[in-house]
Each structure stands twice: as structure tokens, then as C-alpha cells.
Image: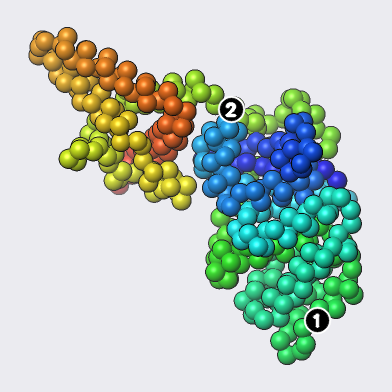
Amino acid sequence: MGNYYLIARNIDTNQFKILELKSKWYLKDGSDQVKRANRLEEIDLVTTRFKSKEEMAERLFKNNYINHLNYDFFIVRERKSKEDKNLKIFETIYNTKESRTNYFRTIAYESLKHNINISRSNIRLMDKFVTKLYYSDSYRKIVNERLTGLPKKVVDIFGNISPKNTIPYNLKYQNRWIMNNYSISRNIIDSFNRYDNLNGDFNNHIRYYKQYANDRAKIKNELLEVCSKDYITGQLSFFQKPIEEKKINKEEKYNYVMSKIKNFDFKNLIREEKKVIVNLNGLAEPSKNDVKILKKSLPSKLLTDIYLYNLHKSKLEACKDSFGETSLLYEDLRQDIKDIKKSLSKDEILDRTYQYLLVYNRLKKKTNSEVESYQKNRGKK
């Protein structure tokens, strides 16, 4: 059934959007028609084209699907019971290990076309699952403690595997319904990838699931509304908080960048020999994505132009107070703006600068807010 939704959640604001998919992204004969609701296999075939969440975020940002890189991605499906409606959440799967991803993608394709009960790749996966449970105490503990997306019924069957006995490969044939369930296969792959990424550490798995749990829970009702089978695109929401984020076009990016450049705090631009750097000391603690963006910095030519603009601007302001000659400084400023505009005419540099300034100004604003809060609390004592 095509009732799974790929969600992009803005970590800064906790707003989210549904990422619509085109079948041409995962099928050779696919079309350009976009779909909000998709099969789980279809979503997996798209996300496994990327090596990481960061790589997927970069592609989405570049194509204006999201407006910066600090996003959480996950998959949801409406789950109804007799008592209430709820959400089933699946973590996204990426190509973290190519050899493993290759046969997983084969399973996904086979599941799209026909039953995977007799899939050689799926049989191979089940054998790997049993082998890992048999030989790895730490993996077995993670599975038994329900730190994977595997259903309790599957855990109850496979969780009792012990190295004291022979490897029970026959369990998959005794429970063929498991081999017929694609979501179980993909959750096994997901558990393998996370086990590797978190170095098999039990506490790391606990922290991983706690990391986004609270913020995701806060948008449960909004998600239930827009991910319902009965939801009609464009219908009014009962919630005041906007759901779908506006795409940022090139003109908006350019206006934002120019505004921030013209009002850059000159004290935070440091000239060292022949290059200019931005002083990042004292900013609020950045996330991993933030660090990646800030570390890349801005092109040296653009940074020099920004430095010169703000230098000439500060001198002009000083001259105005002393009634000094300003015509040359105005000419310098005009030339600085021309140089900056020339650099920003390249889409790659505009995108890179936009990302950088978004992160820089968000962290700066957070720092100022924390300082202000500290001063207020200090004043109350």
C-alpha cells in the first residue's frame, strides 16, 4: 500500500514538510508525476541513493526542497486501532555500506514487483540476521531491548538464539510470514547500519532514539492530520502552526545574503596576512551539520570583498561624524558591492553563502539570547 510519507523536519523550528517523490527517481521507466504517499520500498529506493542524511540534505537544499541543512528525516504511516489513531515511525535508510545496500535494494525492487518470500537476497538477509544474533551478544541485547524497529513478535522468535546451540537457520522457514513482510526486512538492514554507525554500543542506541523523540512527539497530531488517507491536499488545517514550508527561490536567497553582508559585524572579520577569516569564538554550540557548513567557510575572494565593504562602511560613518571627505569612500563602496554581486552571480557560491550565513546568524542570535537571559537572571539575585 502506498500510504507511507517521507518527512523532513526542521530541527530549529520543529516545522515539517512531506517530501513528494517521482517514480523516475527509483524506476528506469518512471514518470515525473509527484506523489505525497508512497510505498515503503519506493521511499527506500530513493534514500539509499545517498550515503548519509547530510548528503541527502545537501541535495534537497540545492534543489530548494528545504531552506537549510539542519533537518531530521524519517518515515511515517498512519496506524489505526479500535481505540485510537497513531503513527508508525520508520527511520530512513542510507547507503552506509555499499555491499549491504546493493542486496537490500534488490529486495526492495523485488518487493515492488512481486512477493519476496522466495527472494534469494531476502533469504540471504535472514541468514545474516540469524548469524549476527548468534555470534554477537551486544547485537542480541539491542534487539531484545527493542532498540530496533522490529516487531515484538519477531523479537520473541529470534531473541532467544543462543551460541550454546547450533545456528537455527531453519527459523526463517518455520516462520515464513516474516520473509513475506518487507518492513521487517528493511528494519533488519536498518538495525545493521545503526549497529555499525554506533559501534555496537548499547548506550549510544539509547541516546540515538532519545535524540529526536520529544520533538517528533510534539508534531504527532499535525502529522496524523496530513498523513491521513482522508486528507485532501490544500484543505484547511485545524492547527495554526504552518505545516508546509515555503521554498526559497534564488531571489530570496540573494536578498537575504546581501542584507546580512551589508550589516555584518565588522569586529568579527579578522584579516590575517593575505586572507580574511570570520571569528566564530563565542557562538552558541553548533550541531554536526552546523560545524560542517562553518568549517567549509566562504570563498576567500568573497570574504575579502565583504571585509573591504565593511571596512569602507565603517570609515564612511567615521567621516560623516567629522565632516571629512567621503566621495572616494562612496566610490569604494560601490566597487565593493559590484565585486560581491559578481561572486554571488554563481549559483554555487550563492547557495554556499546562504547556508553559511543562515547558520552563523542563527547561532549568533542564540548566543545573544542566552547572554540576555543570563543577565536577566543574574539581575534578579
Mark toward the viewer: 2 or 1: 1
Q: Mark 2 Cα within 10 Å, few/some/many (few <14, many 20+)?
A: few
Q: Is residue 309 visible?
A: yes
Q: Is residue 104 placed above or below 379 in the rendered structure?
A: below
| Residue drawn at 80 percent across, 64 percent down | 122
Hey, which residue is sitting farthest front in the picture?
A: 28
Q: Mark 1 Cα within 10 Å, few/some/many (few <14, many 20+)?
A: some
The kind of secondary structure element at disc 1 is loop
| Residue drawn at 14 percent across, 19 percent down | 318
Residue 21: percent from left, percent from top:
72, 37
Does residue 345 appear left or right of residue 379 in this picture? right
Residue under pointer 1: 168
Does residue 185 appear left or right of residue 356 in this picture? right
| Residue drawn at 79 percent across, 64 percent down | 121
Residue 329: percent from left, percent from top:
18, 15
Residue under pointer 2: 247
Q: Quadrant of residue 244?
A: top right
For residue 371, the mark is none
Question: Between marks 2 and 1, how big is the CA–CA gap?
Answer: 52 Å
Sequence-wise first label, 2 or 1: 1
Q: Callout 1, which amino acid?
A: Pro
| Residue drawn at 65 percent across, 62 percent down | 99
Q: Callout 2, which amino acid?
A: Lys
Residue 212: percent from left, percent from top:
58, 52
Taking depth in this image into account, of 34 and 25 the one nearest to the observer is 25
The kind of secondary structure element at disc 2 is loop
User: How many discs mark residues in the rendered view?
Assistant: 2
Q: Quadrant of residue 221?
A: top right
Residue 268: percent from left, percent from top:
26, 36
Identify the coloring.
rainbow
